[in-house]
Image (spheres, helix red, strand yellow):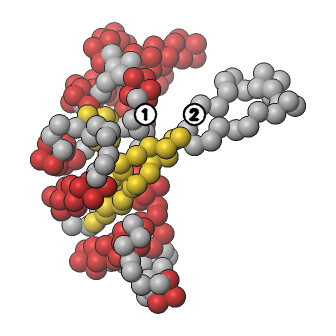
Amino acid sequence: MEGKVAVVCAEVEDLPMPTASPTFSWSQRGARRPPRPRHRLARRRYVATFASSAQVGNLAEAAARTVSQGARRPVVVLADGAKWIKTQQGQHFPQATCILDWAHLWREVSHAIRVAARAKPLSPRERDDQLSLQRSWLWQGGVDQAVQGLHALGTGLPAEAGETIQQAITYLENQRAWIGSYEHWQKLGYPVGSGMIERAVALVINRRMKKRGMRWRRINATAVVALRTDLRNSDWILPQRLRAFP
């Protein structure tokens, strides 16, 4: 039984940067780079259910209508590339900019490169060069370059390693429409990683429903997670001392 969670927001706020200190130096502390600007999602609402994917799409569209009043940012859909998410995006947010979660993308490609490096075998430096090249290409949205690089890397590999490389190539081809310049998207303030979703799963589902010994029927799990989203969205009108659920 799979729980499906979405986060809908209308604003992105900049988080304060660490204050400068006359006694602190990034070079002296051995840091490779200073901290990057960080952002948080504002005016957000959680959507979650154990029902069908169509229900998630309907709930997400309703949440988007709630938070979109006065919003001037374009619609962006960030997801892990699942087929059901693409179906719901096409039905409810057809004009959205679609972004494949960077972590899922890089995990798939880097795993294939490491498998090929062990099978060839490549030296650690050659393996790291391949990883660096692929990461640079994909971060800029260069799917064709990444596919060509994987084809070249897969030449002469044993059957099992070659199959892993081919799976990565197929993954890139299937997700091509959702892969673009992550650097450009990040400059525009768009989210490119699904950390917010992982956090939402922990807040809405895991903390309440994955305690030791718990077993759930789908209908009951769907009802409880509806209460959880009401709580997280501040839609629960009762004061906390009168709430029956945590």
Decide if residue 29 is on the left or right side of residue 220.
Answer: right
Residue pointed to by mark 1: 189
Task: Residue at 81% x, 26% y: name it.
Answer: 25
- The foreground one among 79 and 171 is 79
Can you give x and y, in whole percent of width and height, for residue 123 in the image? 56, 13
Q: What's the CA distance linking mark 2 and mark 1?
A: 10 Å
Q: What element carries label 2?
A: loop
Task: Residue at 39% x, 66% y: name it.
Answer: 233
Residue 99 drawn above or below residue 162: below
Q: What element carries label 1?
A: loop
Amino acid marked by disc 2: Pro
Residue 159 drawn above or below residue 85: above
Decide if residue 59 is on the left or right side of residue 213.
Answer: left
Residue pointed to by mark 2: 37
Q: Residue furthest right?
A: 23
Task: Report whether residue 219 is seen.
Answer: yes
